[in-house]
Image (tube, coloured by chain):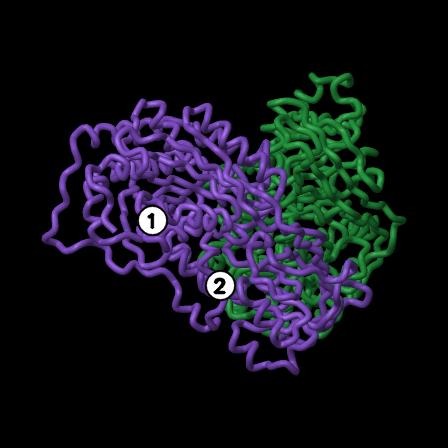
Chain colours: A purple, B green
């Protein structure tokens, strides 16, 4: 999630990134303004959608198929293609007009990934210590039998800069920035993620500039179960990996005592671009079919887990929202468009291609919603919209209050990687806001699997997405920009 | 921990094992009995030991060296030998009379361990699914390039028996018994462990009897971070492994839909026996040097993690208890003997050898204490002793109450694998009782590492061990049997 922002930030200095944590700029419009009430029929329909969603496991069944029968869906893989076809076919069966739209996507594939300490203070002769490592997307390969070098531990970019070329050249730079679990637990998971992820995204480039042989980061995420967290790293021409938190501690402790040497083997490959697919499926509007409200998630996942929370959940939440409208025979006035985006994790090519092809239709895109923060209990939405749009939607909060999903937080930052190109064209965008306190424990790890999704919470997410989308498709006025 | 009980139970039928969960047989002596009060000087000394322990990180520093500088210490490894030498040397430096006692130990070494599903319902053509697996100690090897067979899912021994030879022969049997996390969280971690571990210990034998090609179990332990839990499995002549809970779910879900085939590669080796070492270090008694109170933990660990909680903690708790007595110049009347046992995890050869060599001195072993349930906050002790011994120790509870370690639970079951051979000789035995609610999340996994130990809780454990040991070494009367 949210990788796009980091990609566009690559050309900023790392120091500047620290200030990029999203901040709500305003939480409510001026006190005097009162929104127009919703028509009673709309309220009844929204309540019906909400209640039906809370009783439906349609989305969960789709998620089980995507994660267990198909499995991991990295961009460029046969599973990603199979998933696109499955989603299109399933939405067709639900009565939507679904098509696959081709997108040229990158094709990075993981190879071997092992690491071991081969020298450290008070080492028992003849022994090594295993280090749990995973390659970051964008990493280049070490030689097939690995590279061996001393590890230089730094806690931030400033410390790296202070060391300079002399002390970094030929070494493995290790960024030991800790993910702030307390911040995440206190409701600021985005802040915790943003301040740690800069090293994953930009560390390899900074290390390469000083001649490092490779770059490693402490895994960006909570939990303490010796799991590596993968993710995107700006291509830097050197191998780039992430080690588990426990290994980070060991390396840092030993390096304080004396020189530590590591053998690192990462053999990923960047293959030629291939064709992937966005799934675009319409539930045609009855009065303004040319006006579109997007509900979406991204279909590609990382390859370590099966992408249940990142972001199979987002896809099936969107599928579930549209399927329920069909099931309840609620044809919206505007078109509801389900999109399962391709390639969020390593470049958001799907989101970019869609927006580029629709530049002329931007004004007819009433809004775009994405869910890409897992499947936890929904709290509401982050909205990159005008304050008057927030006002217009205010009556909807009553429908969502019973499930606790009634927060509508105005955001100055982008709210979903795949819909950001649309936001750039002026389209109002919404990001479903889940309870993310443990999301980053599992994010981008082998443990992102179906069992992490609580069926009840997934149903609540479908309810929230359906209610917002149907509201946007039904209100007499278009959402103001 | 507690593997020894399982080993001696191997010849019982699996069904019988279900009843083996440890039960407190009595929690207090008869109401009318009142213990003799402790001498005021003893109480003062116990309080001084307790308070000094709460202010000392001696044990933590030893644990850091054992886990980070030495690393994993599987039986038969250079690290296990190095650890024995380190403990002996460190205790000598603390003023104890330490020696290494040779023990012939088994030497099982892990090899490659990979698994993948190669066929399942609605599989995307050309894809496989990775299964996280680890070999169990005692496993034999598959061919170097693996074996491929259909997976048969059973939930218990009865289901396996019902299937019979026809449906099991040539297949990979998968025991999908779930570790009862709620039971563990509610304070019954031993019960949760015992009811699941029987499949790890005896599943391969039961499967082999019906001609299975291999045996897998769902990992015995809590947590949901895609971690495999290793452990001992009675040698059955077939490969035996454990899969992560997530993979267990996937296999079970897919197998309900149709045939599931797996390729399994496990290449461990059972090498010839080697010489290992128990560390035996005495703090000589001033009045009855021939009477011995043992404080102990086991020095060998599994190889996946660094054995911080299982059981580096037990070793350093015992070391810390003795070191503090030296530091406070508290020479006990009886001898306090620190023992770091070798080979608890795969046969308890250290504990057995020690007891066998001391059969004639059993009566002079006043008591033996072991800590082998991690480093969590101590609640007190499990005691396999006579009810009158419990009564005699009652005044000690007042000293331990301020740190909450004042439970003394009479147990009909053995209370520590390494001291069970002494219990068989009639020696009263005590097991330090830690808060074990999350212990089995990490037990036998790659995540059993130093960061799981909270320094304050480790100090409390040293306090509890020191107070009990010093009491046993000082009371005017020997502990009744």
Q: Residue furthest right?
A: B272
Task: Report the side of A466 relative to B258 (left or right).
Answer: left
Q: Is residue A363 above or below residue A196?
A: above
| Residue beneath the point at 55% across and 38% down | B24
For label 1, the SS is strand
Q: Residues within 10 Å of mark 2 (few under 14, many from 20)?
A: many
Between the residue at mark 1 and the residue at mark 2, the CA separation in whole angstroms equals 26 Å
Element at badge 2? helix
Q: Image point 66% across, 21% down: which residue? A: B159
Question: In the depicted view, which residue is nearer to us: B86 or A94?
Answer: A94
Q: Is A194 placed left or right of A302 in the picture?
A: left
Q: Position of residue B108 (x, y in %)?
A: 81, 48
- Furthest residue toward left: A32
Residue B54, x across and y down, in percent:
51, 66
Q: Residue furthest front?
A: A360
Q: Kindly indicate the quadrant of the structure image that contains residue B176.
A: top right
> What subunit carries mark 1?
A
Against A322, residue A103 (above or below) is below
Q: Label for residue B384?
A: none
Q: Nearer the viewer, residue B104 or A352?
A: A352
Q: Where does the image place residue B444, in percent across and percent down from the top left?
A: 66, 48
**Residue topped by disc 2:** A196
User: Could you classify mark 1 by the number of other residues whose Cα lies within 10 Å: few (under 14), some (14-19), or many (20 or more)?
Assistant: many
Do we see residue A474 in this rendering? yes
Q: Which residue is mark 1?
A: A429
- Left/right placement of residue A422 relative to residue B11 reads left
Q: Is residue B36 visible?
A: no
In this orientation, which residue lies closer to the viewer: B279 or A463? A463
Q: How many marks?
A: 2
Residue B111 coordinates in the image, percent (x, y): 79, 48
State which tag comes first along the sequence, 1 or 2: 2
């Amino acid at each position: 999630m949210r990788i796009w922002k980091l990609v566009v930030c690559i050309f900023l200095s790392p120091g500047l990134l620290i200030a990029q944590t999203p901040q709500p700029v305003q939480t409510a419009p001026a006190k005097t303004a009162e929104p127009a009430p919703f028509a009673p029929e709309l309220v009844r329909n929204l309540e019906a959608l909400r209640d039906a969603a809370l009783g439906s496991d349609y989305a969960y069944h789709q998620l089980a198929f995507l994660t267990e029968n198909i499995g991991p869906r990295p961009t460029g893989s046969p599973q990603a293609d199979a998933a696109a076809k499955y989603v299109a076919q399933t939405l067709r069966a639900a009565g939507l007009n679904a098509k696959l739209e081709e997108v040229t996507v990158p094709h990075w594939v993981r190879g071997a990934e092992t690491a071991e300490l081969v020298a450290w203070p008070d080492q028992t002769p003849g022994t090594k210590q295993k280090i749990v490592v995973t390659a970051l997307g964008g990493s280049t390969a070490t030689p097939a039998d690995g590279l061996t070098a001393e590890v230089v531990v730094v806690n931030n970019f400033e410390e790296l800069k202070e060391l300079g070329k002399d002390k970094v050249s030929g070494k493995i730079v290790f960024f030991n920035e800790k993910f702030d679990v307390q911040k995440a637990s206190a409701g600021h998971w985005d802040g915790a993620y943003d301040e740690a992820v800069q090293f994953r995204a930009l560390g390899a480039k900074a290390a390469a500039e000083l001649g490092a042989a490779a770059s490693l980061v402490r895994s960006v995420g909570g939990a303490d179960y010796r799991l590596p967290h993968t993710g995107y790293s700006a291509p830097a021409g050197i191998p780039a990996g992430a080690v588990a938190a426990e290994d980070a501690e060991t390396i840092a402790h030993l390096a304080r005592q004396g020189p530590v040497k590591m053998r690192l083997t990462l053999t990923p490959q960047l293959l030629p671009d291939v064709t992937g697919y966005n799934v675009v499926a319409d539930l045609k509007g009855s009065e303004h079919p040319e006006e579109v409200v997007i509900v979406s998630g991204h279909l590609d996942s990382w390859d370590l887990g099966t992408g249940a929370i990142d972001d199979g959940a987002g896809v099936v939440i969107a599928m579930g929202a549209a399927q329920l409208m069909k099931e309840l025979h609620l044809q919206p006035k505007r078109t509801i468009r389900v999109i399962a985006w391709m390639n969020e994790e390593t470049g958001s090519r799907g989101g970019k291609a869609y927006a580029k092809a629709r530049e002329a239709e931007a004004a007819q895109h009433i809004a775009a919603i994405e869910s890409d923060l897992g499947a936890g209990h929904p709290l509401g939405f982050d909205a990159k919209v005008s304050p008057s749009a927030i006002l217009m939607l205010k009556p909807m909060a009553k429908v969502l209050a019973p499930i606790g999903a009634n927060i509508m937080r105005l955001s100055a930052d982008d709210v979903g990687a795949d819909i950001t190109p649309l936001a750039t064209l002026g389209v109002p965008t919404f990001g479903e806001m889940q309870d993310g306190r443990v999301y980053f424990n599992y994010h981008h790890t082998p443990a992102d699997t179906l069992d992490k999704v609580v069926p009840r919470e997934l149903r609540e997410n479908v309810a929230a997405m359906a209610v917002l989308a149907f509201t946007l498709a039904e209100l007499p006025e278009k959402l103001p920009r």
